Every structure is written in structure tokens, then in C-alpha cells.
Image (tube, rainbow, N blue to C red):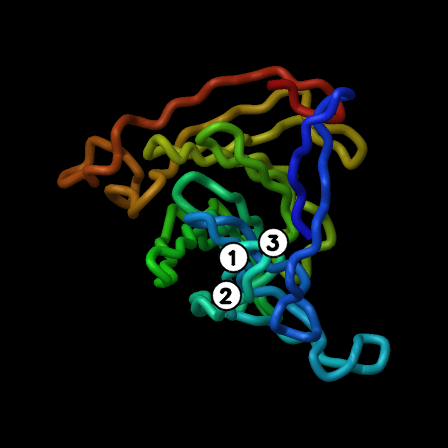
């Protein structure tokens, strides 16, 4: 299904229309999805191809990437992900589909990559990895900044992470919100945000100092920090 906005006297509203079914007859759960150069991409995901879970079926992770040029066209096989992957975050940007984290049957991953389809060729450009492995998280794109909240660090995690990260795609820095004063029932009364990761490429040296010898040309300024207030239950920005 795909939504479109219709103008009406009572205001704008969403109208849903049916897209062609995916080539995988078993469907796909938790894939990456977004738009690159006007084409819809659906990448990775999971399913139970042989039998459903309640009948003893085995869950399978996929690395296939499908593309759809228009609502009335057919799905094409665009390529493959670097590994079978699902349960990550996907955000459509002006440059392509930003894919963050995710997991397979045994591991959670911190990898971040930009998925693009240019002249029929699929590309996956590595971006700065997340501070920690992450799957089952929430994410949104606001302006040029990707925000990531919560999620599970490992397959055995029993609690969601209380973290809030951001990556400024227009700047070689990202930010991590380090929260204090947490309980199981309340969110922090304050948070400290630290700029610490270049958006592309590795840090210039093991200490992360921009004054090290032969610094990365993508590292533009030292780390900095600031504090903001938040109300219990949700941060205030």
C-alpha cells in the first residue's frame, strides 16, 4: 500500500492505494524500505518460507533488494545487501535510503549505510556506525538530522536501551544523548549530548582528538557538549 495526499475543502487527507505484491510469496517482515531516485526499495527482511511459526517453520533472514519504479510497474531484483538483515531503521533522505543497525539470527549490528539506486545499479555506501549494535529501535528524519531512540543492543537483551542518538547528515558530526537519573518508570530529568562521531569515515586517531597527527579531512572540530532539560516521560527539545 502507498499513501497520497488529496486536497479537499475540509483539508488535506491521505488516500491509500494498492501496490503490486512483493515477489517473495511468503512476504517480508521488518525489511528496510525507502525511496531512491524515484524508485521504491525494499531490502532484507524475514519470513517463514516453508511453514508458519506455529507449524514449526524456521525463520529466515534475507539480503535481497527489490525495486519498484512506479505503482503500476513490476518489482525488479535490484541487488543484495552486504548481509541478510532485518529489524533495522530505514529513513528516506534526499540522497537515498539511510539504513541503520538491524540484526540477523545471531547478532545485532551497528553498521549504517546509504542505499541508492543509480541507473539501475544498487550501491551501499558505508556511513559512521552507531555507537552500539542496535535493532528494534525507533527513528525519524528531521531536516538533515537522523534521530534514533531506544532499541535492543543484543539478541538476549530483556530491556530496551535508554539512549537517544542523532546523526547530522549535513555535518561530519553526530551526537549521543547520555541520560542520567533513570528509573524503570521515569525518564531522565536531564541529558547531556556529546558530539563525537564523524558522519563518514573513521575517527582521526584512537583518542578521537582532532589535534592528532594526520587528522582525517572529514573531522572538522573538537568534541563539545551541552545540556537540555526534559520532562518525565519524554524529552523536551
In this view, the residue in front, 143 or 230, is 143
Q: Splitting the image into 4 quarters, where does residue 231 fall?
A: top right
In primary-sequence order, the first of circles 3 and 2 is: 2
Q: Secondary structure at mark 2?
A: strand
- Secondary structure of residue under mark 1: strand
Q: Nearer the viewer, mark 3 or mark 2?
A: 2
Residue at label 2?
Answer: 65
Residue furthest right in the image:
54
Tell me the quarter of the picture where residue 213 sits: top left
Residue 31: x, y in percent?
Answer: 60, 59
Which quadrant, please, contains the C terminus?
Answer: top right
In the image, 27: left or right of 106? right
Would you name the residue on which mark 1 appears? Answer: 41
Question: Which residue corresponds to mark 3?
Answer: 135
33 shown above or below 84: above
Q: Residues within 10 Å of mark 3 (few under 14, many from 20)?
A: many
Number of labelled discs? 3
Q: CA distance from mark 2 to mark 1?
A: 7 Å
* Label 2–label 1 contact, CB within 8 A: yes
N-term mark: 3 or 1 = 1
Q: Nearer the viewer, residue 193 or 9?
A: 9
Q: Callout 1: 10 Å neighbours few (<14), some, many (20+)? A: many
Q: Are marks 3 and 2 in contact (CB under 8 Å)?
A: no
Residue 119 point in image, percent of width and height: 33, 58
Whole-percent x, y for residue 69 in the image = 49, 57
Amino acid at each position: 500500500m502507498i499513501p497520497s495526499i488529496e486536497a479537499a475543502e475540509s483539508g488535506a487527507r491521505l488516500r491509500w492505494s494498492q501496490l503490486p505484491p512483493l515477489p517473495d510469496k511468503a512476504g517480508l517482515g521488518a525489511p528496510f524500505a525507502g525511496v531512491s531516485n524515484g524508485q521504491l526499495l525494499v531490502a532484507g527482511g524475514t519470513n517463514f518460507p516453508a511453514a508458519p511459526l506455529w507449524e514449526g517453520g524456521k525463520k529466515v533472514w534475507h539480503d535481497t533488494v527489490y525495486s519498484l519504479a512506479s505503482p503500476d510497474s513490476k518489482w525488479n531484483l535490484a541487488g543484495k545487501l552486504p548481509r541478510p538483515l532485518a529489524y533495522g531503521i530505514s529513513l528516506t533522505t534526499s540522497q537515498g535510503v539511510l539504513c541503520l543497525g538491524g540484526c540477523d539470527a545471531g547478532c545485532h549490528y551497528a553498521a549504517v549505510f546509504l542505499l541508492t539506486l543509480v541507473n539501475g545499479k544498487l550501491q551501499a555506501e558505508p556511513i559512521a556506525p552507531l555507537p552500539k549494535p542496535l535493532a528494534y529501535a525507533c527513528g525519524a528524519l528531521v531536516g538533515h538530522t537522523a534521530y534514533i531512540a531506544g532499541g535492543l543492543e543484543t539478541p538476549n537483551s530483556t530491556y530496551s536501551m535508554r539512549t537517544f542518538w542523532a546523526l547530522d547528515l549535513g555535518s561530519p558530526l553526530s551526537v549521543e544523548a547520555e541520560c542520567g537519573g533513570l528509573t524503570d518508570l521515569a525518564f531522565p530529568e536531564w541529558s547531556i549530548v556529546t558530539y563525537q562521531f564523524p558522519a563518514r569515515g573513521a575517527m582521526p586517531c584512537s583518542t578521537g582528538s582532532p589535534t592528532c597527527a594526520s587528522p582525517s579531512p572529514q573531522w572538522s572540530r573538537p568534541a563539545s557538549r551541552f545540556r537540555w532539560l526534559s520532562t518525565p516521560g519524554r524529552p523536551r527539545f
